[in-house]
Amino acid sequence: MAVRMGFVLITSRCIDCDACMVACRAENDVPLGKTRNWVKSSGVQGKFPKVKEVFQPGNCMHCEHPPCVAVCPTGASQKRSDGIVLVENSKCIGCKYCLTACPYEARFLNPETGKADKCTFCLQRLEQGLKPACVQTCLGQARQAGDLNDPNSVVAKLIAQYPTRRLLTQVGTGPSIYYIDDLVPEIPAGQ
């Protein structure tokens, strides 16, 4: 079975420490004021003394059917055979079509290069056998990444064990980020 890279993001483990965003910015030289990943807050919910706040980490969904690729006039936005969606800078003309097409608002125009920018799954790290920077630095292990088709990977084990949800499935993009909202007491061993 072909490799299909994706993320599992466990909201119950995210504490909004922003280590993922800092690591991504440092690893990928992301300009100040921009980000390739994020953590959104639900705001405080409930009534005292039973209050909670839920954090939802995110980044490019590395969609099965990425609209950003379909609208790119130069072929700069591409989907690899392993499911990772990238922007080839040498082909990008900064037209912003892909920014508009992404329903997840996962892209930005890099003010330094004038090119579309987004999460690359830290491809440079994957090629060295390392985890993406956001996954490596996540204190609560809320971010997990791997081959969704490999039953021995941590992401496949989590998806098999817990209920998941994906964002905006009604638009037909097939996001490769799975969210788990249940309490996950232990991260399974995996590749």
Image (spheres, helix red, strand yellow):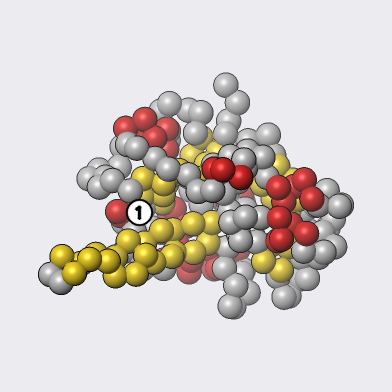
Please name the residue shown 36% across and 30% down the image: 160
Quadrant containing the N terminus in the rendered view: top right
Q: Is residue 82 left or right of residue 162?
A: right
Residue in front for this viewpoint, 175 or 103: 103
Residue 112 placement (x, y as % from top left):
73, 75
Vertical side of 173 occupied by 73: above or below = below
Please name the residue shown 25% across and 47% down the image: 183
Please name the residue shown 29% across and 70% down the image: 44
Q: Residues within 10 Å of mark 1 (few under 14, many from 20)?
A: many
**Is residue 79 something one can see in this rendering?**
yes
Q: Which residue is mark 1?
A: 11
Disc 1, SS: helix
**Is residue 127 something one can see in this rendering?**
no
Figure disc tally: 1
Quadrant containing the C terminus in the rendered view: top left
Residue in front for this viewpoint, 121 or 101: 101
Residue 177 placement (x, y as % from top left):
50, 45
Residue pushed farthest left?
49
Residue 111 placement (x, y as % from top left):
72, 75
Type of amino acid at the residue the image marks with label 1 = Thr
Residue 135 placement (x, y as % from top left):
44, 53
Q: Is residue 80 left or right of residue 188?
A: right
Residue in front for this viewpoint, 106 or 90: 106
Residue pushed farthest top?
1
Residue in front for this viewpoint, 168 or 113: 168
Q: Quadrant of residue 25?
A: bottom right
Q: Is residue 144 left or right of residue 119?
A: left
Please name the residue shown 22% across and 45% down the image: 185
